[in-house]
Amino acid sequence: MSTLAPVAVTHWCRNCDTHHALQQVQQCVPAPTALNGEVDILICPSCNSYDIEELREVSDAQ
């Protein structure tokens, strides 16, 4: 029997106030002007907003 590793919530959508893991919000899109021809962007899977903020751990959290 294998156990699943917990998925860390690492990003927050400011538009719809939902929380997601990086693999849920990160998308790779074609970008002809980029060196490798593509760029990674963050898009909310719930509302398609680009207003995503990375959550950071703080030492004085309550």
Image: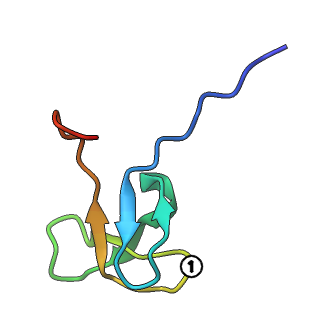
Q: Residue furthest right?
A: 1
Q: Which residue is farthest front? A: 62
Q: Quadrant of the C terminus?
A: top left
Residue at position x 51%, y 61% from top?
A: 24
* x then y, percent, for residue 3: 73, 21
User: What is the x, y in percent for residue 21?
Assistant: 47, 53
Location of residue 16 with respect to 35 vertically, above or below: below
Residue at x-position 42% and y-position 68%: 27
The image's colouring method is: rainbow
| Residue 32 image point, x, y percent | 23, 82
Q: Indicate the amino acid at tag 1.
A: Ser
Q: For the point 44% across and 65% down, which residue is it?
A: 25
Q: Secondary structure at mark 1?
A: loop
Q: Is residue 39 visible?
A: no
> In this figure, which residue is indicated by the disc labeled 1?
46
Quarter assignment of residue 22: bottom left
* In this rendering, position of residue 37 left or right of residue 6: left
Above or below residue 58? Residue 35 is below
Residue 29 visible at all: yes
Q: How many marks?
A: 1
Q: Residue at x 37, y 59 (%)?
A: 11
Which quadrant of the rendered structure holds the N terminus? top right
| In the foreground, 37 or 44 | 44
On screen, residue 2 versus residue 26, left or right, reads: right
Local packing at callout 1 (Cα closer than 10 Å; few below 14, some 14-19, many 20+) is: some
- Residue 24 as seen in the image, left or right of residue 62: right
